[in-house]
Image (cartoon, helix red, strand yellow):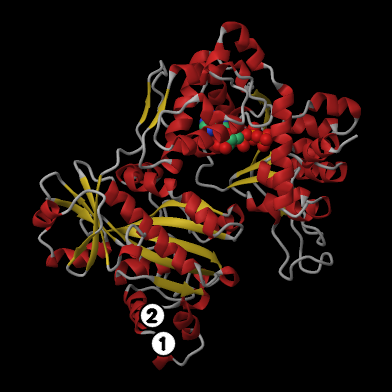
Amino acid sequence: MTLNAVNNAALTPPEQTPPLLLRSWQRSRDYGLSQHSHHAPAFLEQQALRHTQQQYANVLHHLNTHLPLFEQLQHGRRCRLLFADAQGTILFSAGDPYFGNKAQKIALASGASWHEQHMGTNAIGTALKEQSEVCILGQQHFLATNQGISCSASPVLSPNGELLGVIDISSEIGEHSQDMPLTAKLMALALENALVMNQAHAHWILNLAPDAGSLQQPWSGMVALQENGQVLGANRSARQWLPELDVPALLNDLTQGELTPVKQGMALLSRKPKLNKVRHSATIPTACAEPVLSEHERSALKLMNSHIPLLIQGETGTGKDHIVRRLHQAGSRASGPLIAVNCGALPCDLLEAELFGYVPGAFTGGTKQGRPGYIRAADKGVLFLDEIGELPLAAQTRLLRVLQEKTVTPLGCHKPEAVDFQLVVASHQDMTAMVEEGTFRQDLYFRINGYTLTLPPLRDYSGREFAALLQQLLHTLAATHSPSKRVTLSDKVITALQAYHWPGNIRQLKQQLAVAIVLADGDPIDLRHFAALPLGSEQTLGAEHTTALTRAPDDLKSITDQLIKQTLANNNGNVSATARQLKMSRTTIYARLKAIKPS
Ligand SMILES: Nc1ncnc2c1ncn2[C@@H]1O[C@H](COP(=O)(O)OP(=O)(O)OP(=O)(O)O)[C@@H](O)[C@H]1O
């Protein structure tokens, strides 16, 4: 069904309503649901949810590796990507946190069942029931409580053709664009292809398409074969071809890498790539994909779970944001939202409105409906205020009142509303010095600083810690940037990386590793793949040079400056957008720009 067809359905007389919608509404009534009654959502218990997520670990892993595709296609939109299993239980949710909070309120969140039996007509449940792509806009939802959102869903099939679940993209009603159903379908196809490509015991991948130009596209056919031609799995497009083909005989006729005409089109045979194997010749201790929490982190978690505010300090790129996300996931508020706000990236004139919210007509330029604001969006969850030192004094006073009274009063209104959130703040600045200088309120500092977790800079990591981090980053980056090729790293490279002083910390290491993986293109990663870093050539890695290599601030500054200049140009000179993209504070950007300008 096309988006237009559904769109029009809400306006057309009942006899012209698409049959799919009529069937689904009838089923909703048959389930005993009534449109305007309150139906308590059905949620899986946390333990049962974890168990189901473990059963779907492979699917969720591949979904995670395809998140950049979703982010690229729907960048900046107020929407979320969801995956629900074949029973309609949401197992995965990612995307815009602001909409995430709204979604949470109507149970569009992990653990909730969106089976038609519980939620009536909705994209997830109806796509599962009809086994087809579905787009349900606003009032087409059966339950009145769900009519404020619009959703597009596409079923996902396993490599043996069984219904695995459904990919869904949901947004606020007015924000659902024409390309969202297509993105949902693309994500579903990409996921199905990744599952075929990763079939255990497969030796060959056979691609099939009507013409050569369509081969190896997400919508073309893909079959995983054993050495003897036995079919281990196929995507939905290939499954239409298979009844016509004698695959073992075809395998005998095909030459690896050569385009060959077959009955209905073209075929291409390739070896199944070795996937995501990170091999190294060094003594990197084996690290799991997501390391267990350190002792400090565990203490932080205990305090967080007891509602004690947490202050995280650390240089830029040391992982302040990353650790908050892990603590949220591991903490008692995991089922609530995590609202992360970079105080340095919010435009000064909108900062208070964005944080505290506003009512309609509160100020010129505000939206017609008003906004709940980030603080209310964090209700029942965690509010993470990054770069808290950038908060202007007026906003500090307002925030202090929110923390003391546990209520928030949106701009343009006098009615305080109760809020319940766990506060975590972070800063790379010396907060005590700011208090002494009078740029940060002392009473607020005491309020936000129940416990300070200081993240060390990368240069202070022990050899073991550095190697464990390296291993973990390689695993993640290889999955995204080189899914079909090997990633190998020599001892020499590890030693050089460790000797370097990494002013951009983990962020810089991650970026440089990503570049090196792409440049190496399956070859062993070498020092030349880190051209932007002064790691030196083979000859310059002697002991006396190593110290020199660890101190090259001028080169590094210029790399950072170059990055700032380039990003600023890409953003047409918009400092806030540049700060957001580079995850730096506006103050840092201004300071660097001032320094870059020829004196
Ligand atoms: N322990 C870790 N394991 C893997 N990746 C990490 C880890 N810590 C940080 N990263 C990655 O490094 C990058 C920078 O991390 P993050 O944004 O959390 O740093 P930050 O301290 O908040 O930086 P800033 O102060 O500039 O905002 C991110 O891409 C993050 O995913």
Could you tell me which residue is drawn at 51 percent across and 16 percent down?
A: 495
Could you tell me which residue is drawn at 74 percent across and 71 percent down?
A: 368
Q: Mark 1, residues whose alpha carbon is within 10 Å: few (<14), some, or many (≥20)? A: some
Q: Which residue is mark 1?
A: 17
Quadrant of the image containing the C terminus: top right
Residue 213, compared with residue 380, is above or below; it is below
Q: Is residue 245 at all visible to an observer of this figure? A: yes
Q: Secondary structure at mark 1?
A: loop
Give amino acid for label 1: Thr
* Location of residue 564 in the rendering, given as x and y in whole percent from the top left corner: 72, 41
Q: Is residue 307 at all visible to an observer of this figure? A: no
Task: Tell me if the residue at label 2 has its CB under 8 Å from ligand 1.
Answer: no
Give amino acid for label 2: Leu
Quadrant of picture, ligand 1: top right
Q: Which residue is mark 2?
A: 21
Residue 299, compared with residue 569, is above or below; it is above
Residue 279, compared with residue 218, is above or below; it is above
Quadrant of the image containing the N terminus: bottom left
The quadrant holding residue 572 is: bottom right
Q: Mark 2, residues whose alpha carbon is within 10 Å: few (<14), some, or many (≥20)? A: many
Viewer-proximal residue, 402 or 167? Answer: 167
CB under 8 Å between discs 1 and 2 = yes
